Amino acid sequence: MRFGPSAAVLAVILSLGGGPALAAVCIDKSMTSNEIVDVINASSGCERAMKVFKDCEFGTSGDVQLGSAVEKKCEGDFLGRLKAPQKQAYKREMGVCDQKYRNESGTMYLSFTAFCRAEVARRYSQRALKAASPSKAR
């Protein structure tokens, strides 16, 4: 289930402790961004982490933290095995995401960037896992 901008606005909860705290209703309960990151970190793999990200997105700058957790989860599948040219290609694709919305204002564009970066990491993870899996008999 994807939350639209109006749901993201409703998901913002002002804490009495100082600044605003983001919360989302996902996985059938209300969770803060830190709790969602914990769920992403504990997920069984990149695909599951991405599903949590999609299910729990804020549609605002709060997605940067969630997307970063997904990137790290997915990078565990491939980053250490990439050769220098592949690492450069990965960095270049991430840079494309960073540049895509650089001239736009509004926190939703930070969310778009976070999703773009997470999708790049996810694609690399999928390729690495596919290459590592035993091929099927022909």
Image (cartoon, rainbow, N blue to C red):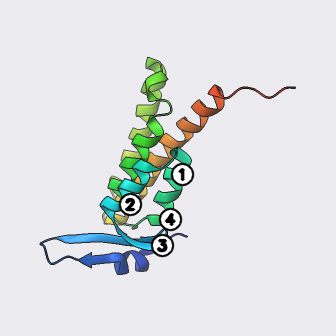
Query: Gap between marks 4 and 2, in whole Å?
Result: 10 Å
- Specify few, some or many for label 3: CA neighbours under 10 Å numbering under 14, 14-19, or 20 or more: some
Query: Gap between marks 3 and 1, in whole Å?
Result: 18 Å
**Sequence-wise, which precedes: disc 3 or disc 4?**
3
Residue 112 falls in which quadrant of the image? Answer: bottom left
Most foreground residue, 78 or 83: 78
Point out which mark residue 55 bears.
Answer: 4
* Mark 1 residue type: Arg
User: Dot 1 lies on which element?
Assistant: helix
**Sequence-wise, which precedes: disc 2 or disc 3?**
3
Name the front one of labels 3 and 4.
4
Point out which mark residue 92 bears.
Answer: none
Would residue 122 be found to the left or right of residue 7 on screen?
right
- Specify few, some or many for label 4: CA neighbours under 10 Å numbering under 14, 14-19, or 20 or more: some
Up the image or down, 109 lies above or below 15; here it is above
Residue position for label 2? 36
Residue position for label 3? 3
Name the front one of labels 4 and 2.
2
* Mark 4 residue type: Asp
**Sequence-wise, which precedes: disc 4 or disc 1?**
1
- Specify few, some or many for label 1: CA neighbours under 10 Å numbering under 14, 14-19, or 20 or more: some
* Mark 3 residue type: Phe
Most foreground residue, 114 or 74: 74
Point out which mark residue 48 bears.
Answer: 1
